[in-house]
Amino acid sequence: MRLLTLLTLFIGIYRSGQAARISGKVTDEKGQMLAYASILIKGTTQGATANKEGGYFMQLEPGTYTIVAQYVGYNRQEKTITVGTDNIILDFQLSIQQLSLKEVVVRPGAEDPAYEVIRNAIQKRPYYLNQLKTFQCEVYIKGQLQLRAYPKKFMGETIDFEDGDTSQKKMLFLSETVARYSVEKPRRSKIEVLSTKVSGRSDEFGLSTPQIISFYENNIQVGRNLNPRGFISPIAGNALNFYRYHYEGSFIEDGREINRIKVIPKRRYEPLFSGYINITEGDWRIHSLQLGLTKTSQMELIDSLNIEQLYVPYNKDVWVIKTQVLYPAVKLLGFDAFGSFVNVYSRFNIAPSFEHRFFNNTYLKIYEGSNKKPAVFWDSIRPVPLHAEEIADYQRKDSLEEAHKNPHYLDSIDRRRNKVNWFSLLATGENFYHEKNRETYGVNPLLQTFAYNTVEGWVVNLGGRYSKRLDTIATSRRAMYVEPGLRYGFSNHHINYAGTFTYTHGRKYFSSFSFGGGKWIFQLNNANPISQFSNTIRSWLFERNYAKFYEAWYAKFNFTKEVGRGLTFFGALKFEDRLPLENTTDYTLANRKNIEFTPNYPEEIMGENFKRHQALIGNVGISWLPGTKYIEYPERIVNVGSRYPLFTLTYTQGINKWLGSDINYSKWRFDVSQSLNLNLGGNFRYKLALGGFLKRDSVAVIDYTHFNGNQILASADYLSGFQLLPYYKYSNKNKLYAEGHIEHHFNGLLTNKIPVLRSINWYLVMGANAFYISSNKEYVEVFTGFENILKIARFDWVWGFEQGRVSTMGVRLGIRGFGKL
């Protein structure tokens, strides 16, 4: 066996030694480099792709070959060479395609000839979309993102890329990947990463996005967040309703006539492309395209995106994609960035035989050692040569990575990072790093440190977090977290202290457990429907003490474990010695007439505060997300979601007599939730629930079924809360209740027809929340509003209905990324 292996290796080395290197540049007639031009061996799909500077190379065995260079919008050029053992320099100079116009009789008001071509392409679109039921290919993926300029400071912090380079122009990201891409239509696909690298980050994995942006689809999804509605293909079934077309002419290639069509959106602020698409005459397939998107295409996040594709014949009847290049550009908050992401497809097999269960829940698999390939390996397989900037970036960042491992360097990085930033200290919290030990220390922001309520008066609430990564691999899940807290109320003079320890792990699937305890202040609804900051503002300025508190000595244990196939088990055990609290201050800055603080218990359902008691509570649950897809890394498996609903079942038991527990009840809850992408129709989300008490011999108010209400301007969570509902009015211990939340995000639909709204890119949103307990205990609220205001804000008008009549109305404001205000 060893002899056979050595012989095979020797033959491979010998054959490689016999191959000659063919290299050169591809330029236009003015000598300008044609970035990512395709160089093919005629009659095959094999070849190379030029880099950003127009340079290419390939290895060929001795023989005679016809080499073809082509670039979208240019005449292709062929050169025949005889390859021996010597290297060959082979340059190409391409001329702009000279288009010939069809002989047509032009009459006033006559239809442009482009429309006949497009109608034929639309008619053939379903055939080409489904022509290959299965295929497999290899894809080389190179992505780079660069900065042209950036601000010196952002949100008060000095921007430091920790690369020793202070110039404005720099390479932010550079990666290469070789992947095997397998498809079985209509829905099955799998990506296997064979080799990958990221400049300056040897333990990480590069971009793995071999997916073909198929313009044979009606609706095209480009990335995840560029436009949630997707974009309409120029040859979609309904494309004639959205686009105008102009016939630019045709050119001949290998005896085929190819029509060049200019694509023009009929209206601005629609999810539409503009540019050129080349369609073959007679069989009406896509030959190549150059299409672009801008802000007027309702793009999010970036300013422009240009897409280039080139298809080549695989055989007489089948064409396959050869190259796909994306050019994004963005200017945002002082950052000016641009990039290129090139995919080169090769080694197509249009009739692969897949093993049984080859397509499973793992849609992306990254093999062990794929990111440890040496430089000589990449030099031997890379179809797109590196250009000068990329070579320099690899050399500099790889050297920096080695330097970064030096303990003295890590200490210097810590000193720079750990300078106090006053904005973070005030609003978001401050972190302090100790990279050498893989440790982070965090302190809560001042806005969370000081608070006011009628029970404790002014409060100092000191808290923070300590975390330690337990493996040297940055992506490992093995980590521990410690969260201590110390709280003092200046009015009731109570000192409370508590802490939580959490451990996360799981080489395959995610698992965690935590335990904690101490003496602390909790809201009667443990879901904390009103934040500490909001309650401070409402109590201190408006004399509204919506939050109701109790104090407890407690101990708790929680666990979560994923087991695959979309299944997750979770559970908890908690003991509390619950102490009632009363108001100890009525201080307010407002002192409004006819408004007084209410007692520290919900008067709607209680005549007096609860009595001190003990509670031992256990709960277990299971969640199932059918069709869950996973990314399988060498050291872990990551859940990336599913297109199906999430089902969750929870059972809670109040355990009587154990540890002196006074409660005795059992309850259940079943949830179904889903987010449905309706493409051009927007996004529809829902969450439905059923639940109730199976046993209710002794139920404390804390353990009631509480609906998450809201009585402040800041919005509650949209799919689990009610925007106008009083916090405890409908808290209950009924045997059965039903709850539902729905909302539809139009994502630019309708508002793109209104001039002012489409120019500022506000999106319409509508929905409803409701629950039913009994015939005289039901509540419905409906809302409509706008989101994407300044990219982060949402504003809603809300109407609440009780017993079929409007009982309340109001407005709500939400800020993305700030959680519960």
Image (spheres, rainbow, N blue to C red):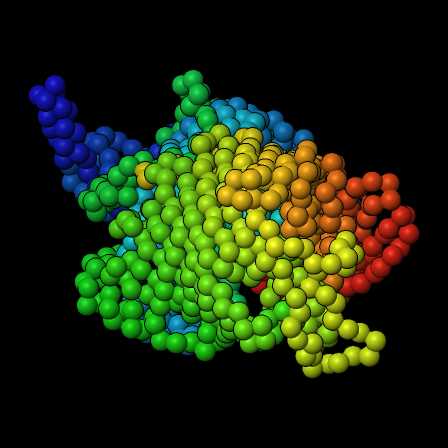
Reply above or below: 378 against 757: above
Q: Which image quadrant is residue 352 in?
A: top left
Question: Which residue is painted at 69% across and 64% down in the image?
Answer: 600
Figure quadrant of the C terminus: bottom right
Given residues 322 and 627, the one toward you in this image is 627
Identity of the residue furthest to the right in this view: 805
Given residues 744 and 749, the one toward you in this image is 744
**Residue 776 showing in the rendered view:** yes
Given residues 652 and 608, the one toward you in this image is 608
Percent of width and height locating residue 788: 66, 60
Q: Is 9 positioned to the left or the right of 720 in the image?
A: left
Percent of width and height locating residue 800: 83, 54
Given residues 673 and 680, the one toward you in this image is 673
**Residue 682 showing in the rendered view:** no
Q: Is 579 positioned to the left or the right of 9 in the image?
A: right
Percent of width and height locating residue 620: 54, 36
Question: Which residue is painted at 21% across and 47% down in the image?
Answer: 375
Number of disc labels: 0
Identity of the residue furthest to the left in this view: 3
Question: Which residue is painted at 49% across and 29% down in the image?
Answer: 565
Question: Which residue is painted at 43% across and 55% down in the image?
Answer: 500
Figure quadrant of the N terminus: top left
Percent of width and height locating residue 657: 56, 40
Reply above or below: 629 against 375: above
